Image (cartoon, rainbow, N blue to C red):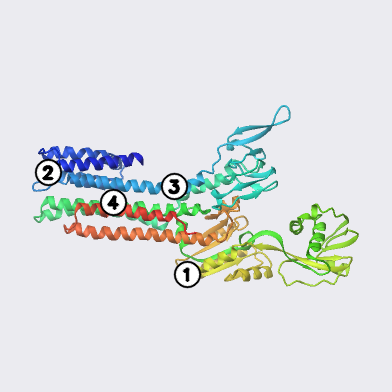
Amino acid sequence: MKKQLSLIVITAILLVIAVLIEKGLIFNIHFSIFNLLLLYLVPYLLIGHDTLKEALEGLMHGDIFNEHFLMSIATIGALCIGFLPGAETEFPEAVFVMLFFQVGELFEGYAEGKSRDSIAHLMDIRPDVAHLEETGRQGDRELQDISPEAVEVGSIIVIRPGEKVPLDGIIIEGSTSLNTIALTGESLPREISVGDEVISGCVNLSGVIRVRTTKAFGESTVSKILSLVENAGENKSKSEAFITRFARIYTPIVVFAAVALAIIPTLFGGALATWLYRALMFLVVSCPCALVISVPLTFFGGIGGASRKGILIKGASYMDVLAKLHTVVFDKTGTLTHGQFAVTAVHPEACNEHQLLHLAAHLEHYSTHPIGAALRDAFPEEATDGCEVSEVEEVAGHGIRARVGGKTVCVGNTKMMDAVGANWHDCHHVGTIIHVAIDGQYAGHIVINDKIKDDSAEAIRQLDALGIAKTVMLTGDRQEVGEKVAEQLGLSEYHAELLPADKVSHVERLLGEKPANSYLAFVGDGINDAPVLARADVGIAMGGLGSDAAIEAADIVLMDDKPSKIALAVSIARRTILIAQQNVGVAIGIKVAVLILATLGIATMWLAVFADVGVTVLAVLNAMRALRTTA
C-alpha cells in the first residue's frame, strides 16, 4: 500500500506538471500532439501499467469483461480520440481516469486490510512451540521445544506465563488465569487450576502449569477454529452470488452497448469523435467495480466484526438466514442452563442452613452421583472441618446413612425418610429434593437443580425486541422442570420429556408453520443435538470453549456459551445486509443517472470518473462500517 500510495502521489505531480506545460504556464514551448501524448504517457504508464497488465492477462485467459479491461479500453480510447479530425485531446482525462481508478484500488486494499485485521486476531492464536516434558537420564524433568504438530496425545507439556496454549489438555499441576479474548471476545480472565481443561489458543497470564494433552494438534480447538475462519468465504451470501451473476451478464452488455453508441449515431451523420467520446464515458461509468468489490467486502467485514465478539460464522450465506429469523429453538441443558447440578435452595427445619449443608456434604462425600458433587461444591469446608463420619451405608434407591458426631444422619429421597419415620414434606421449588433426617427427626431438605445462565432471560428479551416471532425450548428434562424454565425466561412455548427424534419432529413442525422467506435457528450444545442442528435452517452451537461437536456440526459457533450473543449475531447480520443493500442501491442509481447523461452528451469524463471510481470509494468506505459491532 505504501508503494501504491507513492505511485499515486508521483503520478498526480507529473499530471499537474504535464497540464501546466500543455497550457504554456511553464516551459513556454509549443508541443505537437505526438509530443503531448508522450508527455502524458509517462504518468499514464507509471500509474496504469498494472491495470494494463491485468487486462492483457484477462484477454489471454478468456476473462475479457472485467474492470481492468473496461478501464484500459476507456483510457486508451481517450488517449487516441484526439487524433480524430475535429476532436479535442483528452490526454489529462485519460491519465486522471487511471489515477482515480488506482485511488479506488487503494481504498479497496485498505478496507480489505482492515477486514482481514479483524479476523487476523484469530490467526494470532496459532501457537509457535510446545515445551514437551521428558524424563532425563538422571530421572529429572527436561523440556524439549518442538512443534505442536509433533506432540502426541497424553504427553505432558509446560506452559509458562505469557505463552499461548499450544494444545487442548487437562491441568495436572499449577494454577493460573487464561486470557480467552481471541476465542470468546471477553476480556475477563478465566481462573483455572488442577483438573480444569485448557484449550489451545488462549494465553497463559500468570502461573506455570503442567498440562496432559487430550488432543492432537490437528484436532485441537485452535486448528478447528482457524480452519473455520479460513473457509468462511466459501459459502457466498445470496447478495454476493447475485452480484457475481449480475456482473457476468451486465459487463458484456454494456461493452456492446458502448460499441453501438459509438457506431450507430455515426451511420446517421453523427460526428465520430463526439460519439466515441460518449461511448468511452459510457464504458467508464458502467464498470461494476462498486458492486463487485463492496458487496463481498461488506459481508467479509460483517464476519470479521462478529468474530471479534466471539461469534464464528462459517460463511456469508448464514448472514442472509440470520437477518430473516422467524423462530429460534433452544435446547435447555447446556444452552439456556449451565448443564451442571447446583444447590438452588436450602430449607432447614431442625437446624440452620450451615448445619444442614454440613451434614449432607459429609455423607455425599462417599457418593459418586452428580448430586453428591453439587452438595460438596456448596459446602467446600467439608474436607477440612475435621468432622468424623463412620458406619457409612449406601441404601440402594434410597440414599446414604452414616454416624456423624455420634448421631445417625440419613440423606436421601422420600423413601429413605419413610424408612426412618421422619415426617418429611414436599417443596414448592422445582428440582431434585434431597431430604435430611437426624436420629429419625426430619431436619429439612435441599433443592438441587440445573442453574439457568445469567444472561438467558436477557437473550430472550433481546430476541423479542428484534421481532423474532417465536422462542421455543425443547428439552428431555421433566415436564415441571421445563415449565419452570420456560416461565422464568418468558419463552413462547416449550416441550419437555423429549427424545432426540422428538426434537427433530418438533423442528419439522415449526419449519412448516413459519412464513415463506423466513428462517428457523436451532441453538444447542452441539454434542447430542447434531440431528436438530443439521435439520434447522441455521444451527447455532455453544462452543463450550472447545466442544468439537459444536464446531463441526453448527453453522455458527458462540465461543463463550452466552445465549445473548444470538441477538448480537442477528443484529450484525441485519446491519451487514442493510449496508450491502445501500451500496447496491446507491451504485446502480448513480450509474444509471450518469449513463443517461453521458448518452445525451451532458456528462463529462470527470463526472464519469466520479460515477465509477468515486462511487466505488464511497461504497468501500460504507462497507467498512460492517466491521464495527454495536455491542
Between the residue at mark 4 and the residue at mark 2, the CA separation in whole angstroms equals: 27 Å
14 left or right, relative to 215: left
Q: Residue furthest top?
A: 137
Q: Earlier in the sequence, mark 1 or mark 3?
A: 3
Instruction: Provide residue 399's location: percent of width, then percent of height.
Output: 82, 62
Number of callouts: 4
The residue nearer to you, when weighing 190 against 267, is 190
1 and 3 marks in contact (CB < 8 Å) = no
Q: Which residue is mark 4?
A: 613
Distance of mark 1 from mark 3, alpha carbons?
36 Å
Q: Earlier in the sequence, mark 4 or mark 2?
A: 2
Sequence-wise first label, 3 or 4? 3
Q: Which residue is mark 1?
A: 515
Q: Earlier in the sequence, mark 1 or mark 2?
A: 2
Q: Position of residue 603 (x, y in %)?
A: 19, 56
Q: Amino acid at mark 3?
A: Arg
Label 3 vs label 2, nearer the camera = 3
Side of 332 relative to 628 (left or right): right
Q: Which mark is residue 116?
A: 3
Instruction: Point out the tag, 3 or 2, that comes first from the N-terminus.
Output: 2
Check disc 2 and report its element: helix, strand or loop: helix
Observer-nearest residue: 85 or 192?
192
Q: Is residue 548 left or right of residue 140?
A: left
Residue farthest along the right direction in this orientation: 406
Q: Which residue is mark 2?
A: 83
Give me the C-alpha separation between circle 4 and circle 1: 41 Å
- Left or right: residue 231 versus residue 593 is right
Q: Nearer the viewer, mark 1 or mark 3?
A: 3
Amino acid type indicated by mark 4: Val
